[in-house]
Image (cartoon, grey):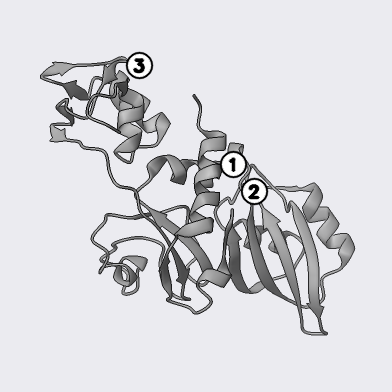
């Protein structure tokens, strides 16, 4: 964004890290002031030299940063929680940029967790309407049949929510456990555990191996953190441009 380039106030807030819907909400609720005047129109034009405040705090467009963390087991997907000894905030505290996770993983789950200060991208990665896929390797107790997995692919209702697998592939079977690769779109709370519980199988281990174009291959070891750059970053940004409403 150049100093002489005018853009919509909604877009300006997005460049400051707000998701589009949240930007609209702040503007229409008259919480945004531009050059001393309250503005409640998302299409109001501003530029980089304007003085923009949200709830009294000056905003300037962020330089977005993108990271991927291989979340270790027993870490909570929150930046800070005084009740929890292990949070992902502890693993990224050396990063000066204020990052937020794109979604969450259960405390006992491991794998890919994207972190960024790009609120618009977080919305795209986590909102089911954008249909960004998430892939997992699931180890469950006892033998799972193809028929049972087909049932989960068709979908089930649990506590008033419709849950389903988009795809599945059986990786390994034994008399004591089954290992399955599954793909989800929605990512409801504890969705995989709830799905397999509905057919009588307890989840023993759960690892997310990809989220959109970002794969576990970038961070193969638990606790590993890596900045997303190069071709992988281009794919993330293409995903963002594809879904951003003009």
Question: In the structure shown, which secondary structural element does the residue marked by tag 3 occupy?
Answer: loop
Question: Is 120 placed above or below 92 here?
Answer: above
**Disc 3 residue crowd, few under 14, some 14–19, many 20+, Cα 10 Å:** some
Which residue bears the numbered disc 2? 185
Q: Are marks 1 and 2 in contact (CB under 8 Å)?
A: yes
Of all residues, the one furthest to the bottom in this rendering is 175
* Label 3–label 1 contact, CB within 8 A: no
Between the C-alphas of marks 3 and 1, the distance is 26 Å
The reply to whether dot 2 and dot 3 touch (C-beta < 8 Å) is no
Q: Is residue 199 left or right of residue 54?
A: right
Per the image, the residue denoted by label 3 is 43
- Considering the numbered disc 1 on the image, is that residue within a helix, a strand or a loop? helix
Residue 212 % position (x, y): 59, 53
Is residue 246 shown above or below 221?
above
Going by the picture, which residue comes out furthest to the right?
A: 147
Q: Which mark is residue 128?
A: 1
Report x, y in % for residue 157: 71, 46
Foreground pick, 2 / 20: 2
* Among numbered discs 2 and 3, the one appearing first in the sequence: 3
For disc 2, the neighbor class at 10 Å (few under 14, some 14 to 19, many from 20) is many
CA gap between label 2 and label 3 equals 32 Å
Residue under the point 30% across and 33% down: 1
Q: Quadrant location of residue 169? A: bottom right
The span from disc 1 to disc 2 (Cα, nearest Å) is 6 Å
- Mark toward the viewer: 3 or 1: 3
Residue 51 percent across, percent down from the top left:
14, 27
Which sits earlier in the primary sequence, circle 3 or circle 1?
Answer: 3
- Residue 26, placed above or below residue 40: below
């Amino acid at each position: 964004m150049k100093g002489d380039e005018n853009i919509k106030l909604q877009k300006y807030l997005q460049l400051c890290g707000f998701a589009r819907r949240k930007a609209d909400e702040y503007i229409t609720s008259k919480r945004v002031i531009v050059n001393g005047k309250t503005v409640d129109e998302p299409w109001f034009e501003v530029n980089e030299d304007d003085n923009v405040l949200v709830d009294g705090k000056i905003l300037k467009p962020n330089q977005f940063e993108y990271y991927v963390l291989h979340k270790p087991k027993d870490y909570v997907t929150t930046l800070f929680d005084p009740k929890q000894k292990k949070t992902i905030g502890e693993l990224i505290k050396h990063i000066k940029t204020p990052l937020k996770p794109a979604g969450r993983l259960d405390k006992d789950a491991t794998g890919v967790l994207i972190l960024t200060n790009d609120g618009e991208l977080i919305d795209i990665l986590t909102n089911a309407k954008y249909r960004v896929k998430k892939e997992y390797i699931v180890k469950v107790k006892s033998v799972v049949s193809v028929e049972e997995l087909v049932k989960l692919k068709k979908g089930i209702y649990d506590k008033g929510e419709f849950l389903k697998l988009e795809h599945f592939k059986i990786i390994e079977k034994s008399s004591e456990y089954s290992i399955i690769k599954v793909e989800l779109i929605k990512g409801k709370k504890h969705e995989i555990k709830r799905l397999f519980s509905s057919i009588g199988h307890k989840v023993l281990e759960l690892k997310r191996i990809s989220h959109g174009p970002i794969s576990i291959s970038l961070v193969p070891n638990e606790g590993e953190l890596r900045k997303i750059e190069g071709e992988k970053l281009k794919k993330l940004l293409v995903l963002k441009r594809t879904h951003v409403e003009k």
